[in-house]
Amino acid sequence: MSAHTKPKKDFLTELYPGFKGLTNAEISASLEKYGKNELKATKGKSILRMIFEELKQFLNILLIVAGIISIVASGHITDGIFIFVIVILNTTLSIVQARKANNAVEALKSMSRPHAKVWRNNKLSTIEITDLVVGDLVSIEAGDYIPADLRLVETINLKIDESTLTGESVAVLKDCDKILPLNTSIGDMVNLAFSSTVVNYGRGLGVVVKVGMETEIGKIATMLNEVDDALTPLQIKIDKLGKMLGIVSVVVVALIFVVGLIYGFDPLELFIISVSLAVAAIPEGLPTVITVVLALGMRKMASKKAIVKALSAVETLGSVTVISTDKTGTLTQNKMVVTKIYDLKNMVGVTGNGYSFEGEISEKNHTIDLLTEIGVLCNDSSIEDNNLIGDPTELALVTLAEKNGISHQEFRKLHPRLDEYPFDSVRKSMSTLHQFDDGKRLLTKGALNQVLSISTHYMDHGVVTPIDDQFVKNIESQNEALASKALRVLAFAMKPISAYKNILHEEKGMIFVGLVGIIDPPREEVKPAIALCHKAGIRVVMITGDHKLTASAIGKSLGILKDGEIALSGEELDLMTDDDLNDAVKHTSIFARVSPTHKVRIVKAFQANGQITSMTGDGVNDAPALKQANIGVAMGITGTDVSKEASDMVLMDDNFTTIVDAIEEGRVIYANIRKFVGYLVSCNVGEVLLIFVAMLLGWGSPLLAIQILWINLVTDSLPAFALGLEQKETDVMNQPPNDPNATIVDKFMGITIGFQSVFLAVAVLISYYIGTYVMSGPETLGETFAFITIITGELLRTFSARSETRSIFKMNPFSNKYVNYAFLFGFGLLFVVIFVPGINAVFKTNVDLTLIQFMFAAVLGIIPLLGGELAKLFKRFK
């Protein structure tokens, strides 16, 4: 790259004249020549590789060996071929599940892709970074990701964190006027900005010079926003559970083999049955099923405006005990309107709604003119043809100026910005330098305490007067009056300025001009959502930069600040030790005037009390708090790219209720995972128990090897997935949050598994006994009876497993269409296996079964269903 060796003037001329941006024709030409601004993704696993990885799984190898031994030792290929078919079906199902989960996550990645602000056709627009082309003029500010490699043409206190590229943790101060030697190292190219780096401070403009794989980051093939492929905590728990069950099952299966030998059963048949039972008993597919359910849950959350970036976050959502939320835009509508102006003598009313220029200021005077001029110039937002660009508070000030007869676009042309000291969350103010007819003026807006602390005089309707104690008391009184009405208060100041060295040192000796009160009405849907959180055992805490009185007024109206709870300010937090804060958070629901460092301390304090925290944020400096929280939540509309990158979840509508919806969905997903885990484990335990008891009784195995494998295939696939898609139960938000440290198979699930396993084994043993010793018929009539009963029993149990607590008689049996489909499909397959000639010969069920016999064996399948219902009744009385 040689752009750093050229003067910015020559460089701009070379690409296009002026600062109006590319035309549509130029965009098309650049796209054709240089290509799209995207990095080539690493290739996913091929189908062949996925097949190979599945086939080398221990259980599949065991099945293949069993199939080969069956063919060689018995001389018959039927059983062996069927075992191979089962391996193929299992492998196919696993690959389909894995690809489905991967596709769902990939779709979500594209939804949270960063955007860029670019000048095109003389207008500032927001586009996806992949649509940038060489020659585009990009506007950047604090919190933005650099979307491509840029030659900077304007820099105002611009500092960029280039650690992702150079490893240097200190942000680089950029200078667009520098012309550098050709061999300058990347870390010293102060007139360039590189793709994937982050703007920490200030703002600037840059021309795109490299896109996609031609960027510096593209050359080293660094991919951003990759989804973590590591197992989630829940998957790890399930994996451990599966291994534990596997060990127990292998031991029991080995005992079955030994007992069978003692009773004199055929060793080859015993071996095939033992291998089949081991495969059926070990829930090796559980982690994959959970991945699919979590991924589908992520997709469902995305449809509700919550983009969850990692599978593990879906689990954590169901365990959240504290939601720490910002006020502006999350609890409120984020449609700021100035309703009051204090001109240091009178409180003046302002009419109008939203960002419409219609409305009036009830009184006009010199101070109000000066205040609105400061508000429109010390401002980075704009309104054009209903296109809102910028911060809502600044948009409200633009609207106020228009109501006062000041065209913000024309006024800014008359008084161009010469320099600026951008807003930051520590000092809570912003200053800009402008040219006026009588000289230069420094204009400042910000929090009252900050602006008052740098002011030495005030504007008394055109007369500059020294500030005294009486003035300070009056201003603070007016501030409290506005704040008590839930108005956000901004203060304004200015001073003439001639020569200066550094604007960063000029915020002093200011002339105080006045105050405005800005209303941001609460969202109507927020109050019921907060009440729902309290009902669900979740605390809601407001963390805001607003005045404590303003925050408290809104907190009380929304039900956040309740009797016995308090509000704390950032100043009060500074005086607290960590131990003091750990105790204070137990009864504090409002944190006002806080900085990003306070947010981190607050999160840690809640976590020190054993709470699972969700924290919202939108600024660059919020990233540490978002990372520290168990669930970091970024704002999709007002949030910076940095906050979105640091978060676990992005709200596409910046709405508090979306957080609550996501938590509810997290609980539903976890509850559904428990349902199908309990269902599958009880199936597996029941099958092992059945054959173990039958062997002890000297009956031999009630099921043939191919029947066991078929049962495993039918019951471990569709019914389990159907339970994973169960609708939410009405009391899901009446329960306390999930304990993240609890085992998935807890005491109550253990009771259910015990009941259902025993009842399943008893039902099948009864069926086998009747088919073998009571009814006369072919040799395999007993096995056929057992086969019908166990499949019917496990399919019917799916209906009971839809709730861990509610009786099946209190549920709508048809409300989960997926369970209905799974039952009909499974029962239809059973009918085919029993009655279709040729197929029933493979399964040894060609016993000329009558329909009455079939129904008799199937009716016994109700017994396991009753076992599940008795388990619920037993738990209710425990």
Image (cartoon, grey):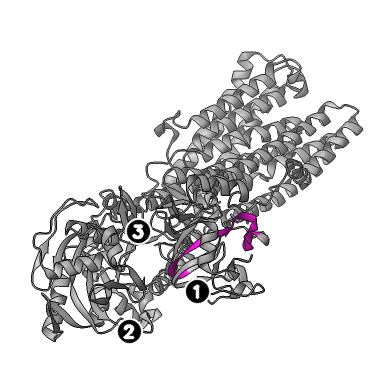
Would residue 67 be found to the left or right of residue 568 on screen? right
Residue ID for mark 1: 175
Judging depth in this view, the residue of 547 and 671 nearest the camera is 547
| Residue 801 point in image, percent of width and height | 51, 38
Does residue 241 lie above or below 175 as drawn?
A: above
**Circle 2 or circle 3, nearest the eye:** 2
Q: Quadrant of residue 684?
A: top right
Q: Quadrant of residue 682?
A: top right
The kind of residue tagged 1 is Asp
Residue ID for mark 2: 499
The tag on residue 390 is: 3
The tag on residue 447 is: none
* Cβ atoms at labels 3 and 1 below 8 Å apart: no
Q: Which residue occupies 47% across, 48% down?
A: 23
The kind of residue tagged 3 is Gly
Judging depth in this view, the residue of 586 and 414 nearest the camera is 414
| Number of residues whose C-alpha sits closer than 10 Å to that of mark 3, classed few (under 14), some (14–19) or many (20 or more) | some
| Residue 269 point in image, percent of width and height | 83, 34
SS assignment at label 2: loop
Q: Is residue 439 shown to the viewer in this render?
A: yes
SS assignment at label 1: loop
Gap between marks 1 and 2, in whole Å? 21 Å
Does residue 423 lie above or below 794 as drawn?
A: below
Judging depth in this view, the residue of 228 and 503 nearest the camera is 503
| Number of residues whose C-alpha sits closer than 10 Å to that of mark 1, classed few (under 14), some (14–19) or many (20 or more) | many
Q: Which residue occupies 59% across, 66% down?
A: 3
Range drawn in magenta: 200-218
Gap between marks 2 and 3, in whole Å? 31 Å
